[in-house]
Image (cartoon, rainbow, N blue to C red):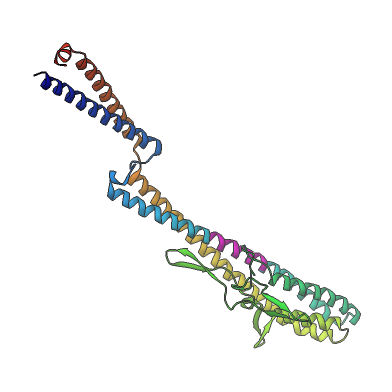
Amino acid sequence: MSTIFGTSTSAFYERSLMDLTSLRKQAEETQAEMSSGERLQRSSDDPVAASRLRRLARTDTLDQVDEAAANRATSDLTLTDDALSQFATVVTRIQELATQAASATISDAQRVGIGAEVAQLQENLVALANARDSSGHALFGGESSADAYTLDAAGNATYAGTPTAGTLSLGNGQSVTRGLTGPDFLQFTSGGVSTDLLAVTKTLADALTSGSGGASAANAALSTLGNGLESIANAQTVIGSRLNWVDLNVDRRTAMSEQRAVEQTEVGGVDLTESIARLQNTMLVLEASQASFSKLANLSLFSVLN
């Protein structure tokens, strides 16, 4: 008989301890939810919700890659736009000098001085054509890491980059060309003839510094320089459109990211008010259970049964 009583008492203690342990575990899990802000502490808590959260997390990871690509595209396109503005400034100055040199009121000696400045400006154009992007590669050389233009012994510039500029993914199947190659805007048609701005300015500088024939060379270069400025302006329009396209995709990605954040909160987030109420209720039950267990364990009947 005492064995039966002892077994019953042991079972009472085991059940009580299991109940108390379960309550403590519920309280700890609720506290963990409140601390982390996440309803799911493990996938087994809600497999379907956990799967949705993993999908959202993967999308966020891919979104970070797209964001980095968009940042690089913005950087390279902004550098391109700045360089094009500098190109326009230099060509405008060369055009002003050509207008002066074309005038019959100045001497050949004065044209030589103008030619020296044009030669310096032409070197500036070559330097701009060999500018670098955010990765240190040729800004106007397409995919080339070397200079976009090389110079021969006479100082003539030749394009040495790839045929096209690279593209960058903006996510969701969208992409953008991150820049321009030199020929995209430095080579254009003038008077029905394909020409190159670097070659035109080099020819003009040589003619002016030679001391003869400078006036006719300057006069002939004026319309070509005007076409060159138009080509640069068109290139700036293209770059501006691409920057706007990147901005539109960034705005779209930001909106989608905000939607995912809302979904993540709905699926796996914690309702703090509900969690506090649940924790208080669990603690109340735990305290009551502990008090009941203590009183029952101290009853004389249990002492007799033991």
The foreground one among 139 and 35 is: 35
Whether 194 is drawn above or below 80: the answer is below
The foreground one among 288 and 303 is: 303
Query: From the image, which quarter does the N terminus lie in?
Result: top left
Residue 149 spot, x, y in % from top left: 69, 76
Identify which residue is drawn at 39% across, 39% down.
Answer: 37
Identify which residue is drawn at 10% across, 22% down.
Answer: 4
Residue 260 spot, x, y in % from top left: 39, 51
Magenta stretch in the rendered image: 70-83
258 relative position to 127: left or right: left
Whether 188 is drawn above or below 306: the answer is below
Q: Quarter of the image holding residue 200?
A: bottom right
- Count every numbered label the image shows and give the total: 0
Whether 209 is drawn above or below 301: the answer is below
The foreground one among 9 and 219 is: 9
Residue extending farthest top: 300
Identify which residue is drawn at 37% across, 35% down.
Answer: 32
Q: Quarter of the image holding residue 91?
A: bottom right
Query: From the image, which quarter does the C terminus lie in?
Result: top left
257 relative position to 3: left or right: right
Q: Is residue 306 magenta?
A: no
Residue 58 spot, x, y in % from top left: 40, 55
Q: Can residue 237 be seen in this snapshot?
A: yes
Q: Main secondary structure of the magenta part?
A: helix
Whether 278 is drawn above or below 93: the answer is above
127 relative position to 20: left or right: right
65 relative position to 222: left or right: left
Residue extending farthest left: 1
Q: Can residue 250 be seen in this snapshot?
A: no
Residue 286 spot, x, y in % from top left: 27, 25
Identify which residue is drawn at 15% across, 12% down.
Answer: 304
